[in-house]
């Protein structure tokens, strides 16, 4: 850990709220010897130091979307020889998180590396800037592009394509106005949303298809054979609404009518929470509830509709409670984590990071009107990040993709071959690294800041010191 982070200690703020009682079993306290900030720095260290190389276009490229704690490619897995902006490969989203942390910490080399990862996506064949279509993956062994994690282009998920466009749009917001990438990324987001609007075939229930063919026709089969029962009830399509709302908010397009229509479909159904992950099949996936909350809350502001806001809190955010684990299961550190879904109950960590984001965004939204409620949301988000921090392994900062407390994936895939335990692989830009986003949101919007002599400190709502930096860094 860099020297400036070795000063982390516990601090107490006068008037801070009491710590949770024993009855609040989901809660975890902060670990002053290894804070949630140190956890993020380890994850970013692993991505930057162990999983990147210079690609054929001269930019930085992920060596693989699936690696072990040594950063070695796991070629036996579907993601082993894939890279790109799609789903779990997540190059744009991962680069954006590195860029933002590089700015926050005053590390220009991190920002430079993040832009080199972004440029690989912008310049090396993934984007059709005339049509708005995005190819999610490149096969690292032969350089061929494909549309899905099965290494073919029979189908792709339009929601996931929308997510990449949303990430481009969000990343563009943080670039200097003089940066020529900025207008390209914004224009690409506009065109991707238009491609989805104009080409994706409607489905009977009024929502969106989970998968489509390259020309936008509904694709009903499962990638693993047979028909997908969630072909029109996947929460992955929430990312289409997220993109449309973001474009409308920035006055780059106007999707208000479409948003009213699709949100009405979503709410009439009582929420559409089918699996977002492309290889899972469950009507209730924890990350679907998080993404639904994070999508509906800004839409409620955009459309000035409090009924949407109420549904976001009452059904979507509250729906995360069913996944909380309030104890360590089978000798594994699971307390404070959310399991993914009943049919696949491993606690995967990008989904947990997304839940932390939802809780922190709820805390920001409610803190002026109801401080105690906001503190409860803060504490749940902090608990999740503290629980995640227990699952780094090896000397390089590796964060597991998931905590397999029920031996779902098999003992041979666990750290140390344990019967129950963390999985010995991860997705560098997603499961390993997605904690970067909620942690930075917390530091920027919710943490208490104070200056002590030559240092600036950030403390959580309980008075725990998260990080201390020399004032010249901030």
Image: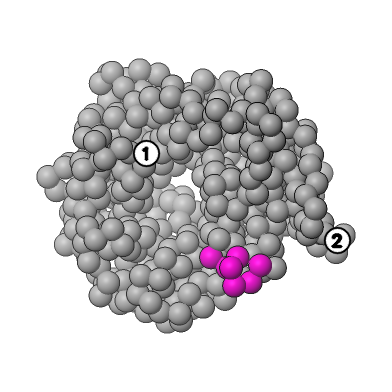
Q: Marks 2 and 1, Cα distance to the nearest angstrom? A: 41 Å
Q: Quadrant of residue 378?
A: bottom right
Q: Residue furthest front?
A: 453
Q: Quadrant of residue 22?
A: bottom right
* Camera-side residue of 31 and 213: 31
Q: How is the image coloured?
A: one colour
User: Considering only vertical position in the picture, is 395 above or below 355?
Assistant: above
Name the residue tied to disc 1. Answer: 92
Q: Which residues are magenta?
A: 365-371
Q: Residue at x 50, y 65 (%)?
A: 293
Residue 89 makes an appearance in the image: no
Quadrant in which the N terminus appears: top right
Q: Is residue 325 magenta?
A: no
Q: Residue at x 38, y 24 (%)?
A: 112
Q: Is tag 2's residue or tag 1's residue first in the polypeptide sequence?
A: 2
* Camera-side residue of 440 and 226: 440
Name the residue tied to disc 2. Answer: 21
Q: Position of residue 358 (x, y in %)?
A: 55, 59
């Amino acid at each position: 850990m860099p020297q400036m982070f070795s000063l982390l200690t516990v601090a107490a703020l006068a008037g801070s709220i009491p710590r949770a009682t024993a009855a609040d079993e989901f809660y975890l306290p902060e670990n002053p010897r290894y804070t949630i900030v140190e956890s993020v720095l380890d994850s970013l260290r692993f991505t930057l130091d162990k999983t990147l190389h210079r690609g054929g276009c001269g930019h930085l490229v992920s060596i693989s979307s699936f690696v072990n704690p040594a950063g070695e490619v796991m070629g036996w897995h579907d993601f082993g020889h894939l890279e790109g902006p799609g789903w779990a490969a997540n190059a744009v989203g991962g680069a954006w998180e590195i860029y933002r942390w590089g700015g926050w910490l005053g590390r220009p080399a991190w920002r430079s590396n993040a832009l080199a990862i972004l440029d690989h996506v912008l310049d090396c064949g993934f984007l059709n800037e005339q049509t708005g279509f995005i190819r999610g993956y490149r096969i690292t062994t032969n350089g061929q592009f494909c549309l899905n994690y099965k290494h073919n282009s029979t189908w792709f998920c339009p929601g996931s394509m929308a997510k990449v466009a949303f990430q481009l749009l969000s990343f563009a917001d943080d670039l200097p106005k003089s940066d020529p990438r900025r207008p390209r990324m914004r224009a690409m987001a506009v065109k991707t949303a238009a491609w989805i609007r104009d080409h994706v075939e409607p489905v009977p229930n009024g929502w969106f298809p989970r998968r489509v063919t390259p020309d936008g026709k509904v694709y009903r089969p499962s990638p693993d054979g047979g028909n997908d029962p969630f072909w029109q009830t996947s929460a992955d399509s929430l990312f289409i609404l997220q993109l449309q709302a973001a474009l409308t908010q920035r006055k780059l397009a106007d999707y208000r009518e479409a948003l009213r229509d699709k949100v009405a479909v979503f709410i009439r159904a009582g929420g559409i929470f089918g699996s977002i992950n492309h290889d899972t099949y469950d009507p209730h996936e924890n990350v679907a509830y998080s993404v639904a909350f994070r999508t509906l809350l800004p839409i409620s502001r955009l459309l000035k509709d409090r009924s949407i806001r109420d549904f976001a809190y009452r059904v979507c955010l509250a729906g995360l409670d069913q996944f909380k684990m309030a104890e360590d299961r089978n000798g594994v550190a699971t307390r404070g984590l959310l399991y993914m879904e009943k049919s696949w109950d491993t606690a995967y960590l990008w989904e947990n990071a997304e839940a932390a984001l939802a809780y922190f965004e709820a805390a920001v939204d409610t803190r002026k009107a109801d401080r105690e409620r906001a503190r409860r949301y803060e504490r749940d988000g902090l608990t999740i990040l503290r629980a995640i921090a227990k699952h780094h392994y090896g000397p390089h900062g590796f964060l597991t993709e998931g905590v397999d407390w029920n031996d779902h994936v098999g003992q041979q895939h666990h750290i140390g071959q344990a019967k129950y335990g963390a999985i010995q692989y991860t997705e560098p830009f997603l499961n390993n690294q997605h904690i970067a986003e909620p942690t930075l949101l917390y530091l920027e919007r919710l943490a208490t800041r104070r200056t002590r002599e030559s240092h600036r400190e950030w403390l959580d709502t309980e008075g725990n010191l998260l990080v201390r930096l020399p004032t010249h860094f901030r």
